[in-house]
Structure formats: structure tokens, C-alpha cells
Amino acid sequence: MGGVNPAGRTSGHQAFRRTVLDALPKDIQTHTLLGLAAMMRLATVGDDGQWRDANGCPLDATSLAEQTCQRVLDHTLIRRIEDPRFNDAGLPGNRRANLTLEQPLTFRISRRQLPESLPADWQVQEIDRKTLEVTVPAGEMNVMLPDARQARVRTAGQLPSGFAPETLYHSVHHPRGLAMSVFSASDCLNDSGLSWESLLDRLDPNQVAVYAGNSIGQMDDSGWGGLLKSFADGKRATSKQMPLGYGQMPADFLNAYVLGSVGATGAALGACASFLYNLRMGVEDIRAGRRRIVMVGTADAPITPEIVEGFRAMGALADDDSLKTLDALECLTDADYQRASRPFARNCGFTMGEASQFVMLMDDALALEVGAEILGSVPEVFINADGWKRSISAPGIGNYITLNKAAALVRDLLGDHALRERTFLHAHGTSTPKNRETESHVFDMVARAHGIEQWPVVAIKAFIGHSQGSAAGDQLVSALSSFQHDLLPGIATLDNVADDVHAQRLRFFREPLAFRGDASFINAKGFGGNNATGVVLSPEVTERLMTRRHGKPVMEAWRQRRETTRQAATAYHQRADQGHFAPRYRFGDGVLEGPELKVEADAIYIPGYANPVSMTVNNPFGRLNDGREDDLDASIDGCSDDKGEP
């Protein structure tokens, strides 16, 4: 797994450790804080292996962790939005105005700044080659005046301060979400401890797939956001904004610049459930035998003035006025912004977040063959719509179906006792009043149906906010880390469970909970009725299932091969914890356009790929007779009149 969110880097469980920091041993706390400090450019490690602070002064690890601790804590997770436009500078915009000119107005303007279409009564005189003088007659004049409006939402889950993924490789006007994708997919590959080239050499290139996207598209100025407002802003649209804005572009970037894959590709968009939609495509491909490796992921960077304002206008976000009313405050401090997201407590709206998450799926035989580290397994993802609705954004009934199916699968796989005692819920948990009531009712009804008395509920949006299509990816990687650490993150902002939450059979907790789980349910309730629940099994359970299938000798051989994999992954984690990142980005490498291929009836040979692409296809429809005469006779027989004549 690999990625980045407001808690830090996904690989090596760094981001997870940030959400359970106080429950960790002191040495691991120090290690986590130093890794985040390095990521935030507050600390570096030189060639001599010595830690140094931002000023280059050498310090021992403990002293440096203590020195940077508060800044790391204050500038990760949810906090005041650091973009100056959301603070004193104000959100840029324009205001329409009607001016009354009591006398003619004369001004000078650059020739290239003069509008192409002018009112008929404007007079223009050339001063020189570059400058014009314009005279506007007295009377009414419609104008757009530059304005800066104070933001009404000032809190969000942002990537750690100082971490800029676009600076880590040769990006050229890449939207933020795509730069996050390059980093996250590279983090995933490095976390695997496996050589991507070696993996490809084992496979038909068509046995690899990439399913990745996002829920909104790239809406910052380098993507569709800049394109859509270019005329209104008086700016020129660039040649990159249109193509780079598409929602499937994270998959396209991986294929073209990170993996060099010619296999299946695509992106399924399902609002907040988008990650699980893509995960299901990967799971189904592997179960059907079509693919052996699938990279699944999402990348969302929605903290822009326009997107934030759109969600605020819906009444979906926790804006400043609502937070003040909620806590009876005159003004909001940084501490108030940090606890804006309150799943299942008294709350007033969700908090925007940004994140990118990727996981590498393999079939079990290949994982054993290459000595892969097994973090868990996904047997199924269930998706159901809501049916008839009044409001397209209101919750409905589909989530009852998805979660109950998921629970039934775990009961069938692991038994009643495991379902009741050794599973936990990763709630969508958006921190809206409607979500806390409706999602808890889904949980309660399914718990009653299966006799579950105290179902632990994790809601990590309390730490990192709602990263839209990447939200379930955040939940999945957190669950995988919980299996490794036997810890569940608490809901740190949960002072009291709200009165309308159906909590009788649910277990809510503020502090990290020691818990050894066999399975987790990754739940998503997206706008429009995009409900999904994924099942993820622990590595221990996965290994038990694989032992039954493959036998103990095969598993023991895998464990021996895994040692080499672990050494490579550990070496990467050590470099990354020191702030040394080298995202995999290969622009222009090995570009092929067609004439280089060797095309045969049964295979296509691609230069640079060890194995050809097989043309063998699955045909479940049967075959027609190859003989044309027989086909003709059959057609004649079917077209005769009652005298036997055609």
C-alpha cells in the first residue's frame, strides 16, 4: 500500500501511527515524529547519517523530535486552511457594478489588454505601437470590479505542511491530484519491496490492470478549475488543462509514466465510494483469472475556493458560523478548527480533506511465488443503489444491503463468533447530522440481525477529513495498519455520542482501542446513492485460508522468499522516514507508436516486454459452422415457401 493524506505517508504505517500516536511506545512516537518532520522539511539527514534541524544544526534524534514535535502536531491532520486566500487575503472574485459617469472617462491601456469587442461609443486612439488611449462617454457603464470575499469555511484536512509532491519529480504544470498520484503509486511500489520490472517479466502484459481515478476531477488551476474560469479571469486556457482534468487521469498517468502498463485500465466514479468501485473491478478481474496484478487507487485534491464553496452552498460543510453556533463561541481558534470534524457526536457538517491512496492486488499464487508481503485480502466489495429518492444527495436504503451482504460473507468465511467478536467497522462517518443518524441505524440493524452486541466503530475523518473519492482508500489502509498494530484509532473529537445516534449495539471510543481483528468492513455512503461496503481480512486469516489451499510446505517456502522482500521494503521505509523520496516518473521512456510491434495471429510482441501479449480470448458463445455451403443451405432451408421453393 502507498499514499499520502493529512496524517502523513501511507507506507510503513506512518500515517496510521499519527492517528494513534499517544498509544505507541515512546521510541515509536519519536520515530514517527521524526519521519513527519523530515517529510515537512523541518529536519534532514545528511550523508553522514546525522540529523539536522531546518537551520542545518546537528541534533540527536530525541532532541530534534522534541524541538519539532509541536509544529508537527499543529501542521498535520485537520487544521486551519493554510492557503492565504482562505484567510486574510480573501477569496478572489469579481462583483458586477453599474457606474454612472458624470463626464467622459479617459484612460490608457496596453494594446494586448484591450478587449476584442468594444462598445460602439468608445473612442480609441493610438499613442504608440504598444499603448492605446480610450475615451468612454458620460453615462451608464457596466463593469466587473475585483473583489476579495472572506472565506466562510476555514478548516480542512490538508497534507502535512511543507510536503509538496510536485517538487519531488519533474512535474510540468501537473494538477495537485496527479502529482499526489505519482507519489502515492511510487510509495506503493516501494512499500511492496518488489521490483516492478521483475514482476512484469513473469507475466503476459495483459495480466496487469490499473483502475484509478477520483470523484470530481482535477479542479485546481492546472486542471479543469483553471480552464472553466479562464474567460471570467481574463486568462488564457492552456493546452494541458483540458486533458489533465479528466477523472480517470490518475490511471492514465500510472500507465504512461509510472508503470508502463499496456493492460486493462479505467476508472469508476461513484462519489464518495469511488475507491471501493475501483477496488471491486480489481477484485473481480483477479477472481475471474483475467489479471494477476491490479493497481487500485484514487487521488483527490478538492481544497479549492470553488469546490469548498460548492459544498458549503449545499449546507454540507462545517463552516465558521455553524461551528461557532455549535459550541456557543464568539470566535474560533486554531484548536477549534482542529476539532471541526466530529463523527457521531453533535456536529454541523463535514470537513474537506485531500488524499491519494493506492493498493497493489495480486492473486494468491503469484504472491506466494514472488515472496510478496501480505497485508490482508479482499474477498468482495458490495455495491447497491438507493432506489427511489426525494433528494439526490440524501441517504437511502442501499447501504443496508451492502453491509448486510458483507456481514453474511464474513459469517460464512469465518463463522458467527468471529463476526460478532473479531470484526470492526470503518464508518463513512462524515460528521454531518444526517450521516450520524442514518449510518448508525444501518450499523444497528445489521448488528441486530447477526446478534452483534458491541461492534467497534472507527471514524478516521475525525483526523483527516473527507477526501471525497479517496475516503474509502483512507479507511482501507488504516484497517490494514490496525491488523499490524492491533490498535483501532479512536474518535478523538467525540466528547459525547449524539442523542440521535443508534448506539445500543455499537462501541464508540475516544482513545485508541487495543483490538485484534480478523476482518474489517470498509463502508461508504456516497452522494447520489453510491453505497459500497468492502470486506478486508487480516493477514493472519488470509494466511490460514491460503494454507488450506496451497499447503504448509508452499507457505513455508513463501515465508523464506518474503525475507528478501521485507529487507527491500525496510530499506525504503528508512530512506522515506529521512525525507528521501524519489517518485518513479519516466517521461518519454520506451515510447512506442506501432511500427515497432511484431503482430501475429496469436500474439503481439512488444519491444521491452519479456513476454508477448497473448491473443487467446475467452469465447463463451459457441462457434458457428466454418463451412459457407452449410451456412447457405441452412439459410435457404429457413427461407422456403410452403411449396419448398425459395
Image: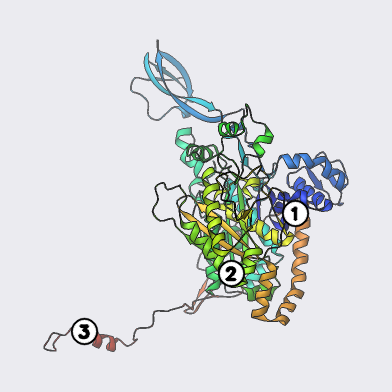
Q: Work out which residue is located at the far top of the displayed protein and give it.
A: 102
CA gap, disc 2 and disc 1: 39 Å
In this rendering, position of residue 99 left or right of residue 534: left
Disc 2 residue type?
Arg
Q: Residues within 10 Å of mark 2 (few under 14, many from 20)?
A: some
- Three-letter code for the amino acid on which mark 1 is drawn: Ala
Q: 22 or 189: nearer the eye? A: 22
Of discs 3 and 2, which sits in the foreground? Answer: 2
Label 3 with label 2: CB-CB less than 8 Å:
no
If you read the primary sequence from the N terminus, does the residue marked by circle 3 or circle 1 appear first? 1
Residue to which mark 1 is pinned = 576
Q: Are marks 2 and 1 in contact (CB under 8 Å)?
A: no
From where the camera sits, is residue 186 visible?
no
Q: Position of residue 2 (x, y in %)?
A: 66, 57
> Along the line of sight, which residue is nearer the eye, 133 or 369?
369
- CA separation in Å, label 3 and label 1: 72 Å
Q: Secondary structure at mark 2?
A: helix
* Residue beneath disc 3: 638
Q: Which-is-in-front pick, marks 2 and 1?
A: 2
Cα separation, mark 3 vs mark 2, equals: 55 Å
In terms of sequence position, does the residue under pointer 2 or pointer 1 come before the other? 2
Under circle 1, the secondary element is: helix
Q: Secondary structure at mark 3?
A: loop
Three-letter code for the amino acid on which mark 3 is drawn: Gly
Q: Which of pointers 3 and 2 lies earlier in the amino acid sequence?
A: 2
- Residue 483 is labelled as none
Indicate which disc residue 411 carries.
Answer: 2
User: Where is residue 398 shown, x and y percent of the image?
Assistant: 47, 57
